Amino acid sequence: MNLLNFPYLVQKEILMKMGYDDLFLLSFTSKRMQNLIKSVQWKEILRIDCYAEIPFVFAIIHMDTICRANIACKSEKPYFIETTDAVEIDGNHFSLFGKYTTKFDTCCVIYQTLEEEDIIEVVYNRLDFLFGKNTPVMMWSRKFNMLPKFPQTEITILEWKAEEGAKYTRLEEYFETMPIQKFVELIKMLPRLKEDSKFYKAESLVINESGEEAEYILSNFKGKNAVFYGAIISDESVLTLLKRWKHMNGFHSLVFLEVAPFKPRNIEKIQKELDFQMFPANVNLPSTEIINYPYFRFSFKFPSNTPPTYIVRDDGIVAYITLDKRHIYFQVKSFTEKQLVENETPIFFVILTKNRVEREFIKCETEKPYFIESTEAVGIDGKQLEVCSLFGKLEYTGGYDKCCVIYKPSEKTDIMETVYNRLDSLFGKNKPMLMCCRRFDILPKFPKTEATVLDLEVIERAHYKSIKDYFDTMPIQKLIGLIRMIPRLKKNSKFYKAESLTINISGAETEYTLLNFKGKNAVFYGAIISDESVLTLLKRWKNRKAFHSIVFLEIEPFKPENVEKIQVELDFQMFPAAVNLPSTEIINTPHFNFTFEFPSETPPTYIVRDDGIIAYITLDKGCLHFLAKSFTEKQLLESGYSIRQSTNY
């Protein structure tokens, strides 16, 4: 039966239920089918990921579920494939076949080695036409001679050594040709490019083996976030670079910086020349601050053994700074020292666009920014407030804040509700909301909130009641993140029904919280839990008495007194040699990525539920990782189950 004979709504319904691999194959049947697929699919694509290796793989990342379908390009036909379909596009000839047997490579393009670059471009153009519509591209290259320049590329990860001048030239040409990247990561190589190269203008930069080049690259960096691992850099260089920020002579857009290792010879000199300040006692600080991006998480860590410190820019803006014998952590804030001391930090409304990368900040604060001459008085819903535009003030705002609302402290709750209602009316249409809160006097209950991150120290009973009322009032959350542990809530609290739960300092409350958890993914850092408690909890899953929905669990630290006893009672099994496993599996959710790491020094293991379903389990290196799968042990053994490593930025 010909799909093209159905009414459009029926065609759309059928196509929306098909996988992207099937749609890709179907697009080669006719020009009309190609246009039909394009008309119903492109709006739902988050990103196209390209893995330049052998084979070259295109991964289509879906918007809502963050699932992926892969198109693999190979120079040889797999031995188990008998027949393929010959295709010609723009004079390029290749073969196609579908439903490859591994988990991710679901269809395949076969090409002649000499035509590699042309075929890859043809496949990309077809994917971009069908599903793209200006969809961003991530390029991960492991081959020096395979670095295609797709125009929508905004994330570049390079994992090859560049020791020859020709390779530097190729890299220089790549970044000059491409748009300024939102994220660049170098895993094995470190080029010294021209000072005005667009490489240094990347929004975020991560270098894994920076060595002595750390200073040169950082001195030319013009983006927002930079991480240098394996750095070799002197005290004087660090002082010079940070003084440029402090005196507004450079790094106007810088938000986050990490340098590791950094072993200063004279910490006191650095602290004195940069005028380190300690936080007032009334300022509530977390142990860690996380800057989330769809492709990387930048973590600022406050010291555990010394008082946290900050430095002040000449315009009053504050930057948190940690300087110990191992790292530099540096994070620029959007408020002044005066606002910090008075504990009147701004309130932000952040608008994320479809691709979840671009964002607009609406800032609410109690006083007009010093660099703004005038504001406009407006009335909304009977409330009076002042607004001003920060457009064109990149050097003061870090490129994020777009406008500012000025309010009186006594009107805080009303103004927040007013701004939210206006944003929801203009851009909402049932769009989800994330609430990140560090103060008990600011915990609004916006009805579309689906993720809540709390960094609160619960001391008074009123605080506990405020949290209890919040979760009882709000819909069940897709993610709850706790920077500091909260008191026990009732067992039937909607807090425990959250789809994903992360707790940074769970302590002795780990067992009680996990015992009542009814969601899918849970991470407990700073855990205190016994062998017997872990055994009891995992036996409940194994015997199908509880945790019916759980997918991922991480407990850290967990140092069992008797590993063998746990392994015997849970009946740990080792994978057959034929099973191909990655070193890491990543579970992508809209708000958090959960990472399961297989052991590198011991054989990977799994346990089996009473109904045959398996769960990967790692019990070493001071932590527990648990990942429930959707297939049975019988299916695993009979199919020679093969899994391709999935890393999604």
Image (cartoon, rainbow, N blue to C red):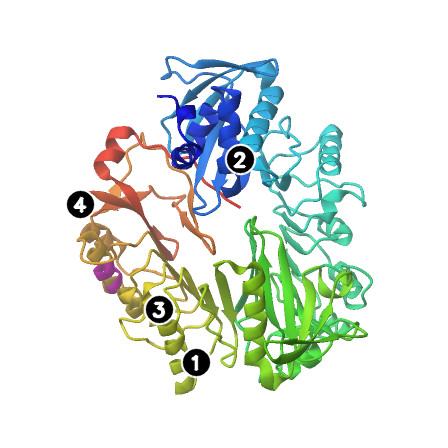
Q: Secondary structure at mark 4?
A: loop
Quadrant of the rendered structure where residue 257 is? bottom right
> Bounds of the magenta span?
533-537
Check disc 4 and give the amino acid type.
Asp
Residue 468: image location, x then y, percent: 37, 77
Identify the main secondary structure in magenta.
Answer: helix
Residue beneath label 1, please? 458
User: At label 2, which amino acid type do we have?
Assistant: Phe
Type of the residue with mark 3: Phe
Circle 3 residue: 495
Cα distance, mark 3 to mark 1? 16 Å
Labels 3 and 2 touching (C-beta < 8 A): no
Give the secondary structure at mark 1. loop
Describe the element under mark 2 as helix, strand or loop.
helix
Say which residue label 4 marks: 611
Give the crowd class for mark 4: few <14, some 14-19, many >=20 residues within 10 Å. Answer: few
Quadrant placement of the N terminus: top left
Identify the element where label 3 is drawn.
Answer: helix
Residues tagged 4 and 1 counted as in contact (Cβ below 8 A): no
Q: Decide: few, some or many residues near mark 1? Use Cα within 10 Å; few <14, some 14-19, many ≥20.
A: some
Would residue 401 appear left or right of 349 to someone viewing this image? right
Q: Earlier in the sequence, mark 3 or mark 4?
A: 3
The residue to which callout 2 is attached is 131
Residue 298 part of the magenta-drawn span: no
